[in-house]
Amino acid sequence: MSKITTVKCLQEMMPKSWAQDFLAAHVNYVRKVRKGEIPAETFQLDYGLEGSNPDGVGASSLAREARQWWYGRKKYEHNEGPNEYRFTAEQGRMIEIPVRKALEEMGVKFQSQAAVKTKNYGGLVDGIGDYNGTIVLFESKHIGASRFLDAWYRPLWECSPDYFWQAQAYLEGSDTPYSLFVVTAQDSSSVKKMLTDDKRFNSKKGFYYNHDNEPNPKVFAFKMYRANLHKVMDKRAVALLTALKGDKPPMRELDPSKDWQCRSDFCGYRDRCLQDGKDGEAIFTLPEVDTKLIYL
């Protein structure tokens, strides 16, 4: 992949005090409901629909392995992954609700969920709202301990390229300046254990994590600013849609013998991919991005 040197991406981590304010806001909201000061709202989970994305390429699919995406859009038969992965995804949908209510308690004025798109890619953003006088996007991510710590210590592009490109696609489609990511841990006890074990067992050979800069083990947030990457995202989307017109799958972008995304647990098309071999037309790949990570 080529390296972008002329485009800088800014990721600004919210101060640790923000996490405490967020958790206090959640408690305040719950107390108001229990005291009868405000009604407990009823929510309906959006499961989405099966089938082709009406916006061309879904924002979450821009960084997906091209051949895997191709098989899915062609509706090839595939093996279902473990059921627990579906339940984990459901947890993520549910946690969006208390995240949104806590942000509202902090003064955010949400608009309704909306589809954001450009000509060739788009999708449904978790939320759009007025945050300190600026209309911005909101993303809620509910992840395991290892990914939680990675997302705190490393730029989003490095630890979760799919989240990064999805965010940039939403920013382009909505013409907003940044997206506020609220990242919650599926198990804060596991986060604490990983940090404690690092200090216990790695003190002599060098710590894996920076213990002078540990996150709140339950939640943190950061601002992902728009990086003017529309041209490369559009080129990727056009390449995927062009490949979809053909009868042969594109060239593999991952190695099925090495990359974890190709394991049968994560890719239901593995058997078909091995049968089709590695040949195919190469698809334009998204480049590396130079990210400036700032802690406040």
Image (cartoon, rainbow, N blue to C red):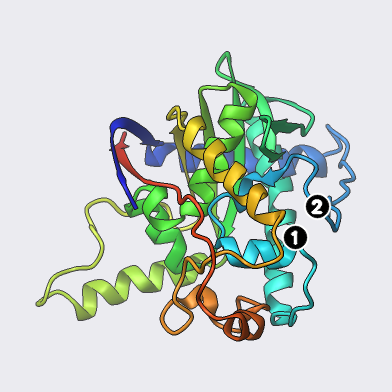
Foreground pick, 199 / 123: 123
Q: Is residue 132 visible?
A: yes
> What residue is drawn where x is 39% and y is 42%?
16
Q: Position of residue 148 (x, y in %)?
A: 45, 60
Q: Which residue is mark 1?
A: 73
User: What's the mark number on residue 52?
Assistant: 2
Cα gap from disc 2 to disc 1, whole angstroms: 6 Å
Crowding at dot 2, Cα within 10 Å, few <14 / some 14-19 / many 20+, comes out as: few
In the rendered structure, the answer to whether residue 296 lies left or right of residue 142 reads: left
Which residue is nearer to you in this view: 277 or 264?
Answer: 277
Rendered residue at 53%/53% (across/down): 63
Residue 27 in sight: no
- In the drawing, does residue 188 fall left or right of residue 149? right
Q: Relative to 168, is 75 on the left or the right? A: right
| Quarter occupied by residue 209 | bottom left
Name the kind of residue labelled 1 in the image.
Arg
Q: Residue at x 53, y 39 (%)?
A: 235
Secondary structure under the numbered disc 1 in the rendered image: helix
Identify the image quadrant of the C terminus: top left
Element class at badge 2: loop
The image quarter containing residue 182 is: top right
Q: Residue 104, how many percent across, how many down? A: 68, 30
Q: Residue at x 42, y 30 (%)?
A: 227
The three-letter amino acid code for the residue at tag 2 is Ser
In the image, residue 44 above or below residue 247:
above
